[in-house]
Image: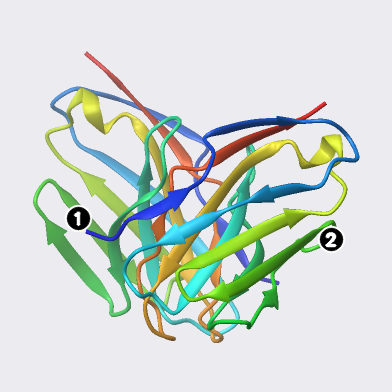
Amino acid sequence: GQNIDQPTEMTATEGAIVQINCTYQTSGFNGLFWYQQHAGEAPTFLSYNVLDGLEEKGRFSSFLSRSKGYSYLLLKELQMKDSASYLCAGVDSNYQLIWGAGTKLIIKP
Amino acid sequence: DVKVTQSSRYLVKRTGEKVFLECVQDMDHENMFWYRQDPGLGLRLIYFSYDVKMKEKGDIPEGYSVSREKKERFSLILESASTNQTSMYLCASSFGREASPLHFGNGTRLTVT
């Protein structure tokens, strides 16, 4: 079957670094997305990885290992506004998205 | 910027009512999707469409239907609303047939009493 696993909740301190992990099992693989969703709002696109390695976009980076079926989202210099849910979604061989349940990130001052 | 607009932010309906949720996007995207989002569960795909007048069932189509008469508009219909359809409904659109980012509307929180 197809499955995406990510932690339900994480807590981190303002100014610190946090890594949110995601493991996936999909029928075929055409990449992995990360989205950010603030409470009561729509998910917004953060990153897409299809090749192994790290992609950096400002304070946010996303990493992919296809051989391990593993990705992580790295958030540096955490700000209070980073408190949100982070959704991981794998793309299967039919280009359908398989979604994780999301990781709620709580930032403490 | 792509804008995806859902007609209602909050909706309260009674059991058995027919409910229409409307979604419009302004970027000429071919693909449109309807998801529902419930606490502790990932986004679950109800229906999607890759073209006008075309529709495909997602993972949980039971109790729902859709209509796509125009490229920019994708409607979700609850034929006879039930309490287990109380949820947040998210519409999304994207460009092309390969992996491209979804652009989401702000969601409709539907309560069925």
Q: Quadrant of the N terminus of chain A?
A: bottom right
Please state the horizontal and vertical placement of residue A84, each as a whole percent of the image: 36, 33
Q: In front here: A53 or B17?
A: B17
Tell me the SS state at disc 1.
strand
User: In the image, is A61 to the left or to the right of B111?
Assistant: left
User: In the image, is B67 to the left or to the right of B50?
Assistant: right
Q: Quadrant of the C terminus of chain A?
A: top left
Residue at the limit of the structure toward the front, as seen here: B69
| Residue B48 in which image quadrant | bottom right
User: In the image, is A2 to the left or to the right of B70?
Assistant: right
Tell me the SS state at disc 2.
loop
In the rendered image, the vertical position of residue B39 relative to residue B91, given as above or below:
above
Q: CA distance from mark 2 to mark 1?
A: 38 Å
Q: In front here: B59 or B7?
A: B7
Label placed on residue A61:
1
Q: Are marks 2 and 1 on the same chain?
A: no
Q: Identify the residue at horizontal 22%, vertical 23% (top origin).
A: A80
Instruction: Look at label 2 and name its amino acid.
Output: Glu
Identify the residue under disc 2. B62
